[in-house]
Amino acid sequence: MSHSNVESNVRPDYDPEIQKIADYVLNYKIENSEAWNTARNCLMDTLGCGLLALRFPECTKHLGADCEGQITPNGARVPGTSHRLDPIKAAFDIGCMIRWLDYNDTWLAAEWGHPSDNLGGILATADYISQVNISQGREPLTMKAVLEAMIMAHEIQGVLALENSFNRVGLDHVFLVKLASTAVVAKLQNLPRERVMAAISQAIVDGQALRTYRHAPNAGSRKSWAAGDATSRAVRLVDIAKRGEMGIPGVLSAPQWGFYDVLFSHTNKDLATKAEEERKFKFQRDFGSYVMENVLFKISFPAEFHSQTACEAAVTLHPQVKDRIDEIEKIVLTTHESAIRIISKEGELANPADRDHCIQYMVAVPLLTGDLVAENYEDSYHAQHPEIDELRSKMVVEEDERYSKEYHDPDKRSIANAIQVFFTDGSSTDKVAVEYPIGHKRRRKEGIPVLEAKFKANLATRFIASRCEQIFELCTDQAKLEQTPVNEFMDLFVVN
């Protein structure tokens, strides 16, 4: 006899999606040389972005031990600083640095995000494990383990992003950072399969961040440390699982109480009639190394990625408009739907985080100056250049449906923008269109030398010339880097 007011208490197996992620990190062998090589370039670029962020007090105020004077034996190092911290806080600090300037890699699909955000948890954990191992007479991890974890974290975050839109239900993409970091950190900790799944289930049942801080009129600096928070939380949850805490096997699928019913159901009226399976994660492809191979690097500009090609077009147009700024009547920005939804803004911009997510602002600066750098977002710069807002007021944003379609096409994944400037005398510039940014896979040959130059410049903001040369030489030698113990690699980034 069954009663509708009595719940079944038969404990289920772990949801298939959790098993799929755990089996991938534990069993998949990465054999594609392009993936390993791209991961090395990604490591360089990501660390460089973090080092550059150390020039900004708004970032560095978040760094360091939670308790003043705290000493952590075998503590993980925070690159570019003297901090030696427990791996949970170190993961936060590294993640915060990496994301602060919006300059690390990007993945664009149904969901957006920055897969290298996971490096916070990966690097802090690997450094800590390596130092503990050495103190106990065991071998440290090598940087090959770090690169492998990066490839796998990219894959988990990126494949889940292909057809699953968390922003449509109001959740921030850092949920995927927490999920991916948890899986690969559990692997680095050498946890058995059931413990890996327990950790993943804890990441899913956890509270998930809202996107409020990314959107007008509430855009603010939390978006610069949210991923650090997510990757740090992953390290904490793996530690809980390692200590034997039970998992939540049906965390995704449990009726009424599970992730799908509570957080992934569409509450918007126009979406509410979709089939029930819309509430479940879709997998366009099996996990492999696709995401790392195809990841987008932000090479030229510290700007939200949907605007990268617009900035490039603006730089191209700068020589034609720089002496005619006062004659500009209208600027037409032709773009894709995602850019319109995320970064097209009118009105006053309240802070740097607001400005680096405004396509009109990110186009105005290079039209005026011929470049776009992180300092251009600061309050002091904005206050000194009223002409930026004057140009913004003359901009018209239009969607090109082809751009929107090819943005989602798995064989193209373009991020196209075009700009045309019209003058009061009736003349105009040509329409300058850029469909693939320099950080796109289609432009790797052109892009990697620029990426390496960016890394060199970022190293030089923290280290003397000989140390910069030593780090660069190691990071550009695939075989040597892979064999380097993690603790020795991290030694190179310590600033006393």
Image (cartoon, helix red, strand yellow):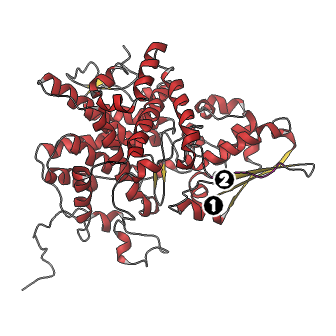
Q: Residue 302 sits in which quadrant?
A: top right
Q: Are marks 2 and 1 in contact (CB under 8 Å)?
A: yes
Q: Is residue 226 visible?
A: no
Closer-to-camera residue (319/164): 319
Q: Is residue 304 magenta?
A: no
Q: Secondary structure at mark 2?
A: strand
Q: Which residue is mark 2?
A: 417
Q: Residue 261 sits in which quadrant?
A: bottom left
Numbered disc total: 2
Q: Is residue 41 above or below residue 426?
A: above
The CA distance from mark 2 to mark 1 is: 8 Å
Amino acid type at image mark 1: Tyr
For residue 107, side relative to residue 398 (left or right) = left
Location of the N terminus by quadrant is bottom left
**Which circle's residue, 2 or 1, is located before the other in the chain?**
1
Disc 2: CA contacts within 10 A as few (<14), some (14-19) or many (>=20): many
- Furthest-right residue in view? 425
Closer-to-camera residue (20/326): 20
Closer-to-camera residue (399/471): 471
Residue 447: image location, x then y, percent: 56, 39
Identify the disc placed on residue 232. Answer: none
Amino acid type at image mark 2: Asn
Location of the C terminus by quadrant is top left
Range covered by the magenta-colored residues: 429-435
For residue 362, side relative to residue 145 (left or right) = right
Q: Which residue is mark 1?
A: 403
Closer-to-camera residue (307/60): 307
